[in-house]
Amino acid sequence: MTSHVLFRAKNIGKKTEEGEWLFRNVDLELDNGVLTITGPSGVGKSTLLKCINQTITMDEGQVWLQEKTPDQWGIPAWRSKIMYIPQRAAIMEGTPLDFVDEVRKFGVHKTKNSVDDPVQIALDWGIRPDLWHSRWGNLSGGEIQRIALAIGCSFRPEILLLDEPTSALDEESCSKVEKTLRTLNCIWVTHSPAQAKRISTVGTFVMQGGDNSEPQTPSEVVVEDDSVHGQASGNKHNYGSGETRSSTKSTHTTTSVTNSSSSSKNTNIAGH
Ligand SMILES: Nc1ncnc2c1ncn2[C@@H]1O[C@H](COP(=O)(O)OP(=O)(O)OP(=O)(O)O)[C@@H](O)[C@H]1O
């Protein structure tokens, strides 16, 4: 009998085009809060988020939201509830407001009246209202990033899948965005151990290439140079169980999720 958590992923695996395992046996749980994912470049963090969002097909494993699979929800509903915000928003035709109107037409999202105003959300992050009338191609990387995030937040998904959501932001903007996002349910990929320490409320999954079945233990993440060090080594556990990181003066000890044995049309915000 499994516990009824908001979101569960069990044994997720994805193969490369050559048929090797890019990663496998990834287990995640999130009931409430922010779960961060770190790991070396190319290990498959973005691909994992896309598998969860059902943007691409996983080769093994299953995901559940409120104990229902994507097929049981229906893929459009699933993607509106577990919304993926890509690392680099695709440059589209038109303006951000055009895009918001387009997405609202799909109807799988909540009705217009129950949707938050993305312009207001982004205003708190330093995005002037007039920028919503600018063509996507005329916006800076940091403006596009905040606007895409604000649109995602405005639809009030159950969970936001965030792929390095502040990578193009200066410190002040980053801090404002983090303040908002920390109040939501997020699975958040970051390369910054310092950011993982700041924002994760339920722990950090240190992703490994290939088989993730080895139980992980708290791993040392050196904060000073903002790069990930150390190897997973320790107790098997799931997120959502209340396990949290501990820290010392110079290092941050993250927790890791259990990892047991190791594409389609979408409605992503400004997505691929
Ligand atoms: N649909 C797919 N099927 C199989 N492999 C894929 C697919 N999409 C991407 N990949 C491959 O997966 C590998 C990992 O890419 P991914 O972007 O997920 O890594 P990452 O850990 O997020 O990297 P970074 O930290 O640099 O952003 C890449 O070599 C990429 O070519």
Image (cartoon, rainbow, N blue to C red):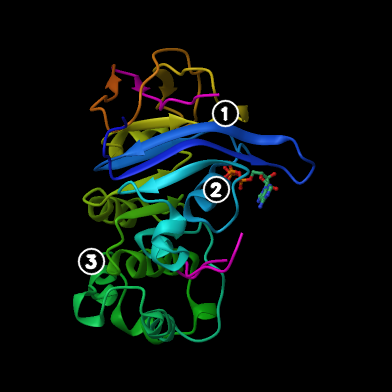
Residue at 41% in and 52% down: 161
Q: Position of residue 261 (x, y in %)?
A: 55, 24
Could you tell me if the residues under marks 2 and 3 are in contact, i.e. CB atoms within 8 Å? no
Residue stretch rendered in magenta on the structure: 249-272
Q: Is mark 3 within 8 Å of ligand 1?
A: no
Q: Is residue 92 magenta?
A: no
Q: Position of residue 205 (x, y in %)?
A: 43, 31
Q: Residues within 10 Å of mark 2 (few under 14, many from 20)?
A: many
Say which amino acid is labelled 3: Asp
Q: Position of residue 211 (x, y in %)?
A: 61, 26
Q: Is residue 247 above or below residue 17?
A: above
Which circle, 1 or 3, is nearer the viewer? 1
Q: Is mark 2 within 8 Å of ligand 1?
A: yes
Q: Earlier in the sequence, mark 2 or mark 3?
A: 2
Which residue has dot 1 on it?
208
SS for dot 2: helix
**Marks 2 and 3, Cα distance to the nearest angstrom?**
27 Å
**Marks 1 and 3, Cα distance to the nearest angstrom?**
36 Å
Q: Is residue 257 above or below residue 113?
A: above
Q: Earlier in the sequence, mark 2 or mark 1?
A: 2
Which circle, 2 or 3, is nearer the viewer? 2
Which residue has dot 3 on it?
124
Could you tell me if the residues under marks 2 and 1 are in contact, i.e. CB atoms within 8 Å? no
Quadrant for residue 25, please give it.
top right
Q: Earlier in the sequence, mark 1 or mark 3?
A: 3
Which residue has dot 2 on it?
46
* Extreme-front residue of the structure: 1
Q: Is residue 152 above or below residue 32?
A: below
Disc tally is: 3
